[in-house]
Amino acid sequence: MRLKEWVMLPTDWIRSGGLTALRWSSGVGSDNTAALMTLLRIAHTADESGIAKATYDDIGLSTGLSRAKISGGLTVLQENKVIARMPLGRSTFQIVNFNPRQGWGKLPARCLYSGDHIAAFSDFKLRNTAELNALKIYLLAVAFRDNDTNLAHLSYDKFQELAGIDRARIRPALSVLTYTGLLHTERVASRINAYAISNAYRLAGLDSYRHAGTTGRSDIFADLISDMQ
């Protein structure tokens, strides 16, 4: 499977709070996790019009999901108007509102794979809310990433507001992202208070040459610490 370094993912639905509909509850939590896992696989091979061709076997190979979970995940995505099924016949999917001119974020692709499998998903068991919340935070980072700094500046309040994640569940979700290597957390000068420090998030494998040491933020951070001493 030939993959690009990154692909375009429509983000208006993420930025407007669409992830809040995907909650962990009895009987549906794992399907919601499977939905976001499946979305990544579909987006990774979508063409310039947002259409991807992938069989259940293709999706299962990349995600480790069973056919039943793939089916459940696809239903969730369709019901939430994230994808449309069979735009060009069997095993084809259209990412809804795909517009290469606006309203999209960079979704890492090639770096996530070991062979044909998304490496991070090897640790996913679909048994707890931390995995679902981790994927929601990951997509928020895609949607809110600043192209100049290569960071997504997101507060716990934003995680609650735009993804429906309880504050007590945010840290476990971030731990999943750190453990699986999907997301890096950086400490940066706050954009609100000149004397405060806040967290920002960097997507693994995306413009990896752009970090605190190459964008000038390391000097800003050092000056801030010096002023506080």
Image (cartoon, rainbow, N blue to C red):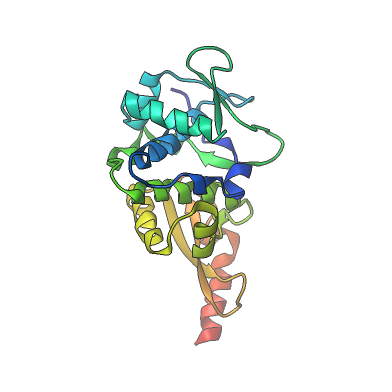
Q: Outermost residue toward the top?
A: 89
Please name the residue shown 50% across and 58% down the image.
Answer: 159
Left or right of 168 in this view: 202: right
Q: Nearer the viewer, residue 179 or 139?
A: 139
Q: Is residue 190 visible?
A: yes
Q: Outermost residue toward the front?
A: 26
Q: Quadrant of residue 103?
A: top right
Q: Quadrant of residue 117?
A: top left
Please name the residue shown 54% across and 60% down the image.
Answer: 158
* Residue 61 picture location, percent across and down: 34, 25
Q: Is residue 41 visible?
A: no
Above or below 7: residue 196: below
Query: On the rendered image, what quadrant is the N terminus found in?
Result: top left
* Residue 90 picture location, percent across and down: 49, 13
Q: Outermost residue toward the right?
A: 101
Please name the residue shown 48% across and 35% down the image.
Answer: 109
Q: Nearer the viewer, residue 101 or 224?
A: 101
Above or below 160: residue 191: below
* Residue 126 picture location, percent across and down: 31, 41
